[in-house]
Amino acid sequence: METVTKRLYEALFLIDTGEAAADWQGINDHLKKIFDRNEAEILSMRKWDERPLAYPILGKKRGTYILVYFNALSSVLDAIERDIRLSERIMRVLILRGDHITPEDMAKDTPATLTEKGIEKPPVAAAAAVEAVVEEDEVDEIPGITDIDVK
């Protein structure tokens, strides 16, 4: 007889920002219903961030990301993904196995919680370096960027 154990998974859901702002509790209840229906145990569910999309999805230019950590049997992942695809409220989802994730990782602040606390989001190192140099009008001396011959 084979023993089946639940595994830890990490899911990032993309929701329309307008719908998330209008019915945040409804979105959370919808996600919980999908997990409950498939006997998955939600460990953590919170807003990750709201951002502009790289390209329009279903005519939407902004999206709200929801980060969920959950335990589930690997056999129910197909059913969870099917329910997500059938949902009109979820634009995209990415589900990854989270064997490497610790409880401390799950408790880390998200960009949304940093904003709520009044802490500015840390800039990307390369972008910050370019911004700092451009502000000083020393464009010829951007760190890490070499001259390129353009023909």
Image (cartoon, helix red, strand yellow):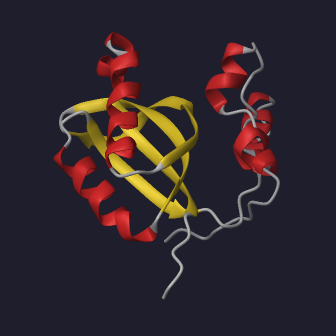
Q: Position of residue 22 (x, y in %)?
A: 32, 11
- The answer to whether 78 appears left or right of 63 in the picture is left
Q: Quadrant of residue 43?
A: top right
**Residue under the point 62% across and 62% down:** 98
- Foreground pick, 88 / 135: 88
- Foreground pick, 108 / 51: 108
- Foreground pick, 127 / 114: 114
- The answer to whether 116 appears left or right of 93 in the picture is right
**Residue under the point 24% across and 33% down:** 89
Q: Position of residue 114 (x, y in %)?
A: 72, 24
Q: Quadrant of residue 119?
A: top right
**Residue under the point 46% across and 65% down:** 73
Q: Position of residue 149 (x, y in %)?
A: 60, 71
Q: Position of residue 75 (x, y in %)?
A: 38, 70
- Foreground pick, 76 / 91: 76
**Residue under the point 72% across and 35% down:** 131
**Vertical arrangement, residue 17 with respect to residue 127, above or below:** above
**Vertical arrangement, residue 28 with respect to residue 41, above or below:** above
The mark tally for this picture is: 0
Q: Residue farthest to the bottom?
A: 1
Q: Residue farthest to the front?
A: 1
**Vertical arrangement, residue 118 with respect to residue 94, above or below:** above
